[in-house]
Image: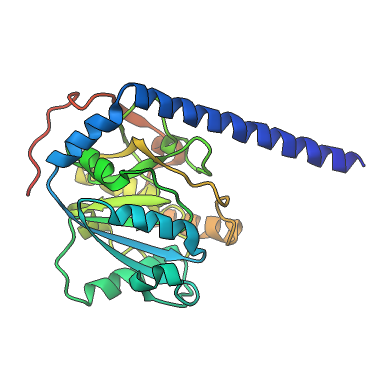
Amino acid sequence: MVHGRQASRVLVVEALRLLARRGVDAAYDLDSALRRVGRRLDRLAEQTPRRHVLALGVYREPADLAAACLELLSSRHTVQLWLGSMSDPAPLLAEHTRVTRMRGGKPENINSLWADWRSQGFPRPDWVLIIDDDIRLPRHFLDRFLALCERFELSLAQPAQSRRSHAAWPVTRRQPGSLVRETRFVEVGPVTAFRKEAVARLLPMPPLRYGWGLDQHWAAVAELARWRIGVVDVTPVRHERQAIAKTYSQSEAGAERELFLAEHSHLTRSEANVTLQIHRRLTQRRVGEFAR
């Protein structure tokens, strides 16, 4: 009986926390709407050159990813979807599913998709997105997100995660009043964007199964290369359906991370969870012209 009551209390506390986080997200959305942030971002997006974007992703459950892919394809940019499935291709995604019955971990599977795409002889994309299958994207996501990445000259970037998302790193959670934060760290998921120079340096990924620690190594590579990297707060994604490491062993992933980081330069967790600069206005920085 005591254990039952404790379990009930835990469930109630978790439900209240989720409700509070939803309220925070709603408040942030209202603040952006009142400040007409979306209109300014749409004008910026119209001025941004059209880019070739390659989106790589592997799915078990297709529902969320199918909706995310529709959102990506609604962009003004040229978007190629190159997907893999862990079983047979889902009807909603069959047109874009290139490899089926994949058995590796995330880095291994993404490497397979990247190799398959490259074997087709396409020209190098301007941007590569790596997307998880359990994300929900806001409307106008890609146009606004890339416009801000280019406005603030980010080479490696991710959209912030909503306050109610399952997020492993505090620095990746959405912050109020911010368009973009320059950070020392960009996470390996749930959505990661690589500009041309980052693609050339970071893809294919090391042959890891789980990929924990890979983003800490990317952070060290970015500092050495003097790349500007960051989190785009004003285009938050929702990563809420399942907790991190739900489909694999946390202990095995952690052990792989320790071995990998022992042999590669990296930032520690405390070094990575740092915001260097917050950009609240589009006019905050004068930036150079991007190659067209």
Residue plotted at (50% across, 35% down): 163
Identify whether 89 is placed above or below 205.
below
- Place of residue 151 in the rendered image (x, y in percent of width and height, measured from the top left): 18, 36
Residue 81 image-quadrant placement: bottom left
Identify whether 65 is placed above or below 266.
below
Q: How is the image coloured?
A: rainbow
Identify whether 150 is placed above or below 275.
below
- Place of residue 215 in the rendered image (x, y in percent of width and height, measured from the top left): 38, 50
Residue 61 visible within the image: yes
Looking at the image, which residue sits at the far right?
1
Judged left or right of residue 107, residue 141 is left
Residue plotted at (32% across, 22% down): 35
Residue plotted at (17% across, 55% down): 126
Residue 152 visible within the image: no
Residue placed most toward the observer, 213 or 41: 41
- Place of residue 116 in the rendered image (x, y in percent of width and height, measured from the top left): 29, 75
Judged left or right of residue 6, residue 171 is left
- Place of residue 246 in the rendered image (x, y in percent of width and height, measured from the top left): 59, 56
Residue 205 image-quadrant placement: bottom left
Quadrant of image for the N terminus: top right
Residue placed most toward the observer, 118 or 15: 15
